[in-house]
Image: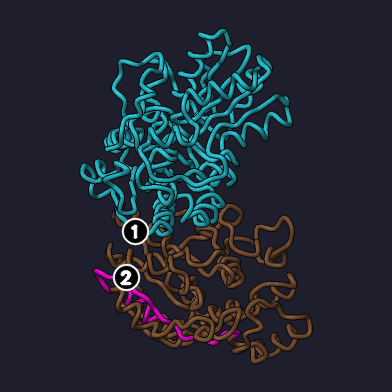
Amino acid sequence: MGERLPQMNQAKGSSEKKPVATRDAYGEALLELGRERKEVVVLDADLSGSTKTGKFAKAFPDRFYNLGISEQDLIGTASGLSLAGKLPFASTFAVFETGRAWEQIRQTICYSNLNVKLVATHSGITVGEDGASHQAIEDVTLMRVLPNMTVIVPSDGPETRQVIRAVADYRGPVYVRLGRAKVPAVMPEDYIFQIGKAHTFHLGKDVNIVAMGIMVSVALESAKILTGEGIDAGVINMSTIKPLDTETLLLASKACGLIVTAEEHSVIGGLGGAVSEFLSEKNPRRLLRIGIKDNFGCSGTPKELLKFYGLTADDMVKTIKEALA
Amino acid sequence: MMRPEITEADLVSLKEKSRILRIEILKMLAEAGSGHTGGSLSAADIVAALYFSKMRHNPKDPKWKERDRFILSKGHAAPVLYAALALSGYFEKTLLKTLRKLGSPLQGHPCSKLLPGVEISTGSLGQGLSIANGIALGLKMDGLNSRVYCLLGDGEIQEGQVWEAAMTAAHYKLDNLCAIIDNNGLQIDGHCCDVMYIEPIVKKWDAFGWHVIDINGHDMEAILAALNEAEMLEGKPTMIVARTVKGKGVSLFEGKVEYHGLAPSRDELEIALKELEK
């Protein structure tokens, strides 16, 4: 089981809720979906215990396929099942799914626009002690560049459950990025996830932080600190990276002079890349990207690593204050 | 699932289909001015046996649920697939002239979004067998007795994913799957076994848990017998190792590695058609 990330527990709104890893929420959501929809099949590449697809496997052994340690075959087999009218969810660690099998995803799934759901866990540095080989910080970039692909990064457990239901109803390839570590619930009780629709917690007049995944909770914590210091800081959960919610981005960029993107991912080509590409064409603003700066991850506890790579609320507050000074 | 016995007349008619496939392949390649001649010609007899005898399919309803599936894993042999689809009636034969041209559904490598009858886009080698496995698993889940055929190149089996898929098919006992290797011995850089040693092909597939049938891939009777044998077999996937000649049917191209990725010139087409129309 993943570690709790202590500094994220003060996120406002749902602090009383128990933190859960998005991968655990995925395991539960799959189980529900499996009960309701007979066409749902699940594939894994020898990591079903870690990705939490093992729960589905136990409940529906006839609809679960373990492909062994072979990610390229995982993608191909999922594609074939989709061609036979099934609704496949294919899971493994993000680095192997998007990296090892990238060209299979490109050629077979995206080019033919197949209805395959790629749900990868163990994204980002909060994988922890396993180190760089297992920490995907390039996956959003790799998936975002593919035509026909939709890219979603849920921020917490409840949002993940909604995302899994939404992608099951959506027809076409989707990449969902999940994590290993427990994260606090940050989304409001009445929040309804829609593909391509960002959630604005608050629109700031000084700065708006556009975050994805676990960085939403860090952004909320930063905004609280900044507000206490008289800076009007907004937070947006951009859980769909592709298609990007450009309407919300335009509003946010028009409301303030500084946009900050925050991702547990490389600053190259991910959320920061997507937001920069859009705003530099449509409404140029001062923009800072918080994330991994063209570097690999390393071993450590998730908490240590967030500090090491400058992804804590303190780091974010410092960056924003310097920019606004 | 039993098919009627193959008669002498059927064989004659199928051989005629192969001949017409080869003519159409050469004509469309010459018109396109580029494309893969050798590997399209070497697979013509296998494809003819599948599309004009063995496979259940309906050109008027390409997505018919109970159809047999054909996956062209060696996607560069697109011309042989396009010719078979056109002759079957999936689309007008005149479309063959548009091969590789801007706006044509006949892309350089097969695109399932553009052309009815193409099950899945291929062209990047090594991926078809995994896809065929997935379809075979789905068909079994639905209790359908449709069969899945997958044609691979011999050079293609140098791709690691092929062996991942080989394990999967045997592990899941996919006896509704029959793969065929177009074993023409050549790949773009030379003889397969000079570029990267692939033998012993039969022993390899046998060791991976497949039923292997070793045949002359230009002997129509042998092809049909092997396809029937595969259909009868239970509990295992079948690999037909079809020994073929690259460029088969046209002496100008037979066994010539340079015609892997070269289209016939106008003059060569004329010579080739003369030979095929004899």
Q: Which residue is mark 2?
A: B237
Indicate the quadrant where residue B100 lies: bottom right
Q: Which chain corresponds to the colour brown?
A: B
Quadrant of the frame with the N terminus of chain A: top left
Q: Is residue A299 magenta?
A: no
Query: Which stretch did the figure color magenta?
Result: B224-247
Q: Amino acid at mark 1?
A: Ile
Indicate the quadrant where residue A284 lies: top right
Determine if residue A285 is in view: yes
**Residue B245 drawn at (x, y percent):** 54, 87
The secondary element bearing badge 1 is classed as: loop
**Residue A236 drawn at (x, y percent):** 53, 21
Q: Which residue is mark 1?
A: A69
Cβ atoms under marks 1 and 2 closer than 8 Å: no
Q: Nearer the viewer, residue B64 or A140?
A: A140
Q: Is residue B229 magenta?
A: yes
Which residue is at a point 35% across and 82% down the rendered structure image?
B213
**Residue B133 drawn at (x, y percent):** 37, 61
